Amino acid sequence: MMDVGRHPKVELMTFSEVESITGFVGNFNVRVRQKARYVDASECTICAECAEVCPVAIPDAYQQGFSSRKAIYLPFPQAVPSAYVLDMENCLGNNPIACGKCAEVCEKKCIDYDDQDKFVDLEVGVIIAATGMDVYDPTAYDEYGYTRYENVITSMEFERLICAGGPTDGHFIRPSDRKAPQSIGFIQCVGSRSRDGRGNPYCSNICCMNTVKDTLLLCDHYPGIATKVFYMDIRAFGKGFEDLYMRSREEGVRYIRGIPGTVVENPENGNLVLTVENTTTGQLEEHELEMLVLSQGVIPRRDGDQIKHLLTLSTTSDGFIMESHPKLKPVDAPTKGVFIAGCMESPKDVKDSVTQAGAAAARASILLNAGKTRIEAITSQINSELCNFCGICAKVCPYNAILAPDRKAKKAPIIIQAACAGCGACAAECPQDAIGMRHFTNDQIMAQVDAILAVEPQKHLVTFACNWCSYAGGDNAGTARLQYPTSCRLIRTMCSGRVDEKFIMRAFRMGAPMVLVSGCHFADCHYISAVRWTQKRMDRIWSKLDRLGIRDDRLRLEWISAAEGQKFAKVMRELEDKVKSVTKEEIEFTMKVLAEEEAKAQEKKAKRQLEVTVL
Amino acid sequence: MTARDTHFKCLNCGHEYDGVYDPDKVTERTCPQCRSNSVRRLPEKKATAKK
């Protein structure tokens, strides 16, 4: 941190918040709010005289509430810049000045009660996001008695208690009687690998080795202390980790395979009695310990939605930010020019975070040094003559790549080609057909529909499959030699968001008994949120089919990932049976109704074009 | 718009169930009975009539 602060080419903006981000790769505009510190950081010498006279005392969040701080304080010893900050929310007041003692004693006169937030506008080419993570709150696990029993603490609290710079100067004591404990237990996987709804289903990655390190610290500082670790698996998979784990065992730390069911406090001495099934021996055991540490898991940042919205990112089902490709582009965000690093992507330790940060910096510098970027070949293009300036396209674009139209000035939306990723959601949603997609034009897709249904249409299942998942799922089924009916005909689109109502209706109009739209699972969508528009659109089309007297179950929707070849084959087999259930009369009725609808629509369109020509 | 209780119908097995629909947080729908994703959100009028 100090090195970063001193680096001539790095401008560190601490105590700041990103307010907005606009633009696209190479041309981002970032507005940063620099919060008022009320202390001139360049003048402050951290003499601490201000804090000494401050009458306010509140729990110190950095020390996990084990000690207090003043309203004017140094956030943490290694803070950059090394200067005090005035916490105006807890200050006795500056309007009018109710106390003012800190300003009175400050010899350098660096306290300014009238300081205001400042806004800084930056123009940047690329953005690396590394906003970190939060820790799981173990109060949901009531059986462990966290917050009920003083001697049950979390691993973060343990860290402060054993740290030389902590509230007890590194003297490890238990909170109830401030005595050094003689026995201590660690419970692993608190809030991780949980399927009961209280915790998270994923492994938090760092807790096992953190506990191993903690036990070694205890053994080193307090050789006589009895340490027990209750676990379901110890995941020591990194370089040197297994050695560390074995060393911990050799030091006498007892590892018990089993997660305690209950923790009860002995009111006389504050000791904790744990009941646990030792799954190695199959015995129910009771352990009396003087202190208990809950090895809490890692969770995505609680304010993660804000950064997700600012950078138009998407998250996986566990809430961490999704990368562009898990293997080939692990530090690229789906939005071009944005890179991710650290625990915002997934739980990881310091080494992995540093590696990823280095990779992100290298990826960013490639773009910056090149000075230019390649745009996608498949992007949207707008026909401004057909546009009615409704602005739906700008609303649906997951990349904010469309500048909204100006209805009053009759200015059509502008598609930023560098930012467009080519999902096609805008083209499918445009009510005026004013947006087309390069290489996946309406005419091209319609021609495929017509070709599929040119011969014996009643026997074919028309399937629209997204390029990245469902189409790859079909490939997967093929390479795995899974059997599925030959009546299935695939039309590839880059995203299911591209599947326009017109394509589906055209298929029915041409005599298709059934139509399937398939795409990525929401968490896998390669176009951030484009797949969500598919589901919304399908609701609309089902309602329309209902209104026209066509069975809604003839139009299907399935989310099939690239790995789900089996699901692909199963869906195709199931739909083959349904295809057979659609009668000839039904198909003829559908064709007739839709032909009438099409005629009406064409008449309306011709009328509109005539009006435009007259105007 | 806010989240509201909605009636859903699976077009694969016909199973109908109540759930929450939030237009701002569209989530993947899966039929609890047959695991199909062809789950239709029924219009409010239709859902009320069915009830």
Image: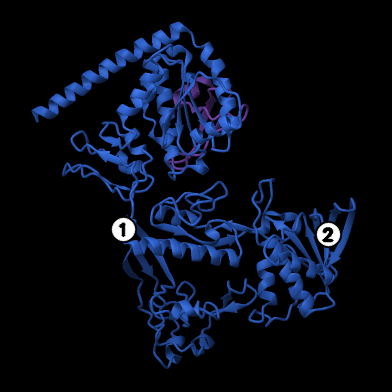
Chain colours: A blue, B purple
Closer to us: B40 or A450? A450
- How far across and how far down the image is residue A226, in percent? 84, 71
Amino acid at pointer 2: Ile
Give the label on residue A256, or none: 2
Closer to us: A148 or A224? A224
Which subunit holds the residue at mark 1? A
Would you call the spot at circle 2 few (<14 residues within 10 Å), some (14-19), or many (20 or more)? many
Q: Is residue A543 visible?
A: yes
Q: Quadrant of residue A227?
A: bottom right
Which subunit holds the residue at mark 2? A
- How far across and how far down the image is residue A363, in percent? 44, 61
Would you call the spot at circle 1 few (<14 residues within 10 Å), some (14-19), or many (20 or more)? few
Give the label on residue A372, or none: 1
Closer to us: A344 or A236? A236
Which residue sits furthest left?
A: A614
Mark 2 element type: strand
